[in-house]
Image (cartoon, helix red, strand yellow):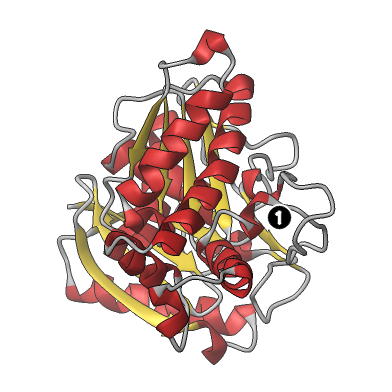
Amino acid sequence: MKVAVGIDIGGTNIVWGFVDQQGVVQAQGNFLTADFSTPAEFVRTTSNAINEVIQNNSDFQLSGIGIGAPNGNYFHGTIEDPPNLVWNGIIPIRQMFEGFFDLPVCLTNDANAAAIGEMQFGAAKGLNDFVIITLGTGLGSGFVANGNLIYGHDGFAGELGHTIVEIDGRKCGCGRRGCLETYASATGIVRTAKIMLEKHSGVSLLSELDHITSKNIAVCAEKGDELALQIFDYTAKKLGFSLANTIAISSPEAIILFGGLANAGKLILEPTQRYMEQNLLSLFKNKVKLLLSQVPEKNAAILGAAALVWKTESNNTFVKTST
């Protein structure tokens, strides 16, 4: 059985798994990111876990290792000044894994990995031109054109979350103000809720909550709470406006929403579609589908990283680190 290992490095958790070519996770595990004070310790522990699975499954034929990580650079195989990780600087993760495995190792950022996963196993199957938007703690994005990810000259293209939608707007973790992710993300919608609650004089289910999350905003909206519905409408207005601009640049066949906030379903999908269409250049109206991801969220990070192996293998474009 041909399998690929997918590894997703997150600020809180690191998940890994063996995935076959049909997208079935055959074995998996996870670690707490905080357990590793150095990248070397992480690579060594993960490599030992991978080798243990291989030893216990003689039918596995490992094709390669795919890694999704914040600020992952596909060209260089490095994680560069990652946000939300205790590791600093430029980390040669690909080269470090190549020290343990005589196999292709590829790395990209987590949103790009999600795009490849969607193309291999999800809603983007058969699509050559699409954009995936991950609506989690921040807003990530991956752009696929003519069947290939757009990396740009330095490997960091496609940062829709850090396009500015409000001059002198909300402070962003990147150090600037008004970035899209400060409005359209799980944390962004919570910021909107707190601001609107302060100004709201009527009755709202949200005012009864001890802790506001994107999930319980959605629950309140589903119950018909007027303020919660206004919060979703405001969020969708920012997102739809940005997607209309995105379409003018890349002309995708579809835009796919994934992640925590996307789990709100039609609460975010329908108003975003409406605002997107309102702001579209007439040339693009009613041409671009707005879809929800079809990759199971439970294994999405693993599938996306592993799919990077299958996609790169099919293109025969593995890049070996120079030594």
Which residue is pictured at 19% across the width and 55% down the height? 24
Q: Position of residue 247 (x, y in %)?
A: 56, 24
Depth check, front residue: 102 or 154? 154
- The residue pinned by badge 1 equals 323
Q: Residues within 10 Å of mark 1 (few under 14, many from 20)?
A: few
Indicate the quadrant containing the C terminus: top left, top right, bottom left or bottom right: bottom right
Which residue is pictured at 36% across the width and 25% down the height? 127
Which residue is pictured at 66% across the width and 45% down the height? 159
Residue type pointed to by label 1: Thr
Q: Quadrant of residue 4?
A: bottom left
Residue 243 as seen in the image, left or right of residue 293: right
Residue 110 as seen in the image, left or right of residue 219: right
Q: Position of residue 318 (x, y in %)?
A: 52, 41
Question: Up-down: is 49 above or below 91?
Answer: below
Question: Up-down: is 243 above or below 126?
Answer: below
Which residue is pictured at 27% across the width and 64% down the height? 223
Q: Position of residue 209 (x, y in %)?
A: 42, 84
Residue 274 as seen in the image, left or right of residue 199: left
Question: Up-down: is 57 above or below 154?
Answer: below
